[in-house]
Amino acid sequence: MRNLVSSVLAIVVVTAVFGFAYPALMTGFASVAFPHQAGGSLIKVNGKVVGSKLAAQAFTSTKYFHERPSATSPAYNAAGTTFANLGPTSPVLAKNVHAAAQAILKLEGPYNPGLTIHQIPVDAVTTSGSGIDPDISPAYAALQSRRVAAVRHLPLATVQKLISQNTDGRSWGFFGEPGVNVLELNIALDKLGGK
Amino acid sequence: MSGQGIAQILVYAAVLVALGYPLGLYMARVYGDGFLLGGDGSLPGGAFGWLRATERGFYRLVRTDAKKEQGWKSYGKTVLIFSLVFSGVLYGIQRLQGHLFLNPDHLKAVPPHLALNTTASFITNTNWQYYGGETTMSYLTQMAGLAVQNFVSAAVGMAVLAAVVRGVARRSAGTLGNFWVDLYRSLVYILLPLCLVVSALLIWQGVPETFHAHATATTLQGAQQSIARGPAASQISMKQLGTNGGGFYNSNSAVPFENPTGLSNFIEMLSLLLIPAGQVFMFGKMVLARRHAWMVFAAMFAVFVIGVAINLPSEQHGSAVLRASGVNITQGNGQSGGNMADKEVRFGQAASTNWTVATSDASNGSVNSGFDAQTPAGGAVPLVNLFLGEVIFGGVGSGLYGMFFYILIAVFIAGLMVGRTPEWLGKKIEAREIKLAALGALFVPTMVLTMTAVAIVTKSGLASVFNHGVHGFTETLYAYDSQSNNNGSAFAGYGLTSFSASFGTVALELGRWVPMMAALALGGSLAKKKIVPASAGTFRTDGPTFVVLLVAVIALTAGLMILPALTLGPIVEGLMH
């Protein structure tokens, strides 16, 4: 009985401190020190929110760089992330990878003469962990660069320069792997003009 | 596998020791007599007066006399009652969230069997999730329910460890400590300060922390995109530090909002092993056996290295499907390569492997890639790590007291070999201790195998399987392995049914409380004993022989138990392709 009363009282205090005061304190700190990150790293163009640096979005137009495949429903659902959960020997995985590779060959082939499946980087045909991976590998960006340059009538070198400007390297040059942020890259392309 | 990737993992190990060691010494002081309250080992007065007053206020509130200690039975009873009452509260919040405040996205009540499983999952420091956080739980449930349990369930494990370690350290004593004191100190002097620092770092790196509802964006192609955010950073720091693992988002730390950069990934990985690693050194200080503690650390580290050495090459080699597809999986030329299915570009292979091994060694269960998609050999690493009972660093508190079971079995076997009564740190190990150690070490593995068997032969069990064939067996095994061992990571295809939720609830509860009570009983039993002086015939537990013996005992008990199941799952799958 004594334990019961103590437990109830402790729960009230612990919930108040760790359930409300602690997140409120951190939220207050975040809104002052890092308001951009705290709000979800939203990106605005001409005053309108067009997405987040941290979320992939659907790109189907040939003038844009495309994201990795996504298993969310609908694709790139930044409010319902998910893995694909297909096992390493899954026939469904085999089918999806094949379909994704064929689509890339069809899309990029005309701009990359002699393109074969062996040149398609693996991240281009696999779903990401979150379904909203904002990055593609530099290799996949390089594969798409000729198409984007051709469609936009831009010199390839200009597109390549934008790719390197929108590549997030390893943190401190050491932790993680480099990735090209697709949304930021596409915004930079739009700013450049072209068709 | 690049040199750069291996260097990342080596730096991880070095920083873990560099931060874990001083943290361990600090924790030993926190649980020592009279920390901040006067007496030996207290910090200088004055500046800490308000902390002292707050602590005394808490003890007055819960009506405990901080100087009055409890025996193991009384301690265990308090733990159980406290957890039971909290379970009721957590269940209630989930069921009522639709009518409560802080629910800007208007989420409805969590269904009963899911709420029950989630309650058990968070109370037991597991954080197994049969739901997607951003689509199921209101901000109130996340903050006042789940996040609070991240603190409390971790603190309960830490408190119990402190009590058991006191039992090892004391001689001819009847008590192990006061639960309320240990709980308060774990929360306020260890978890809270670490959380404040890690939260701030994560927000800086890009993790959201806001009470605003989902943001809506109009994409470059003119579509509408809803972007889930919320008070995430404060919860994520804690789910890592407290080896909880339950994500704010469904895909956990694979989601860029939960883990935006290579650096945030490093910080989160470090957080998940920091306290369990520190507790090994805390143990060494509290029982005055630092060399022995280093040997325990060495044994844990050896198993960690084995995990990395299997997982990284397997994942880099790629899965059968990807190799057969013909796409380029070779590392270099602007890609990490390997098995990128359900992995994120910014982490690549090395950082994904490092996380996989760390989270399954600790009973954390957070993930930064999808385990279901890992190669047979790669995915077998977390499966086995879990099955070893989460003792390789392990959960906060629960990992080390779990390791004590294996240590006792190791010294027992050594004793049999030399024909002497086994001793550990000067205490004679007798029938009662060995029985408790055997119960603690073998109960959960036995339960995992039994439950998997039931789930695989019943229709209701099979309904949860997502990938068919051999991989479906592995999914099932992993589900009960993870819940029973209070890890919480998943081969996430395994789905929610009322059967899987209820069966899982049983696994969660028994997997937590049976070993914990065995550990407390063991602590109580050891506390009563006198110290016998070491002689030439005493088996030394502070040298490399002990490390080898300890690793061998772990491999021969839990390791051998899971071998037949491994044969049915990952091994067959690996051979088939």
Image: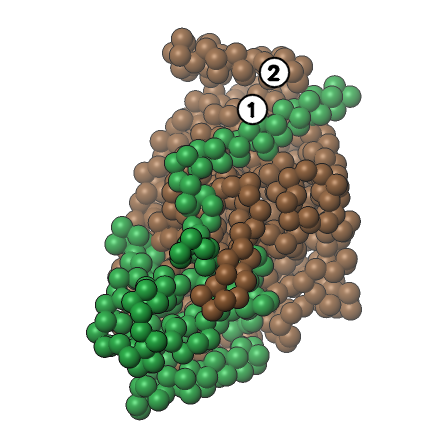
Chain colours: A green, B brown
Q: Could you tell me which residue is drawn at 54 percent across and 15 percent down?
A: B54
Q: Would residue A27 be found to the left or right of residue B354 on screen?
A: right
In the image as oriented, which residue stretches furthest toward the left? A157
Q: Would residue B573 be found to the left or right of residue B194 on screen?
A: right
Q: Could you tell me which residue is drawn at 73 percent across and 49 percent down?
A: B108
Residue B18: mark in rendering:
none
Q: Could you tell me which residue is drawn at 44 percent across and 37 percent down?
A: A30
- Residue A62: image quadrant is bottom left
Mark 1 falls on what kind of element? helix
Residue A61 visible to the viewer? yes
Where is residue B86? Give x, y as percent.
Answer: 69, 34
Q: Could you tell me which residue is drawn at 35 percent across and 37 percent down?
A: B19
Residue B184: mark in rendering:
1
Mark 2 falls on what kind of element? helix
Q: Is residue B378 above or below residue A100?
A: above
Q: Would residue B151 be found to the left or right of residue A156 on screen?
A: right
Q: Is residue A109 above or below residue A3?
A: below
Question: According to the image, label 2 marks what residue?
Answer: B59
Where is residue B322? Give x, y as percent.
Answer: 45, 78
Q: Earlier in the sequence, mark 1 or mark 2?
A: 2
Q: Nearer the viewer, residue B220 or B575?
A: B220
Q: Would residue A116 be found to the left or right of residue B553 on screen?
A: left
Label 1 with label 2: CB-CB less than 8 Å: yes
* Number of other residues with Cα within 10 Å of mark 2, as a class: few under 14, some 14 to 19, many 20 or more: some
Q: Amino acid at mark 2?
A: Tyr
Q: Chain of mark 2?
A: B
Q: CA distance from mark 1 to mark 2?
A: 9 Å
The quadrant in which the N terminus of chain B is found is bottom left
Q: Amino acid at mark 1?
A: Tyr
Where is residue B214? Give x, y as percent.
Answer: 56, 50
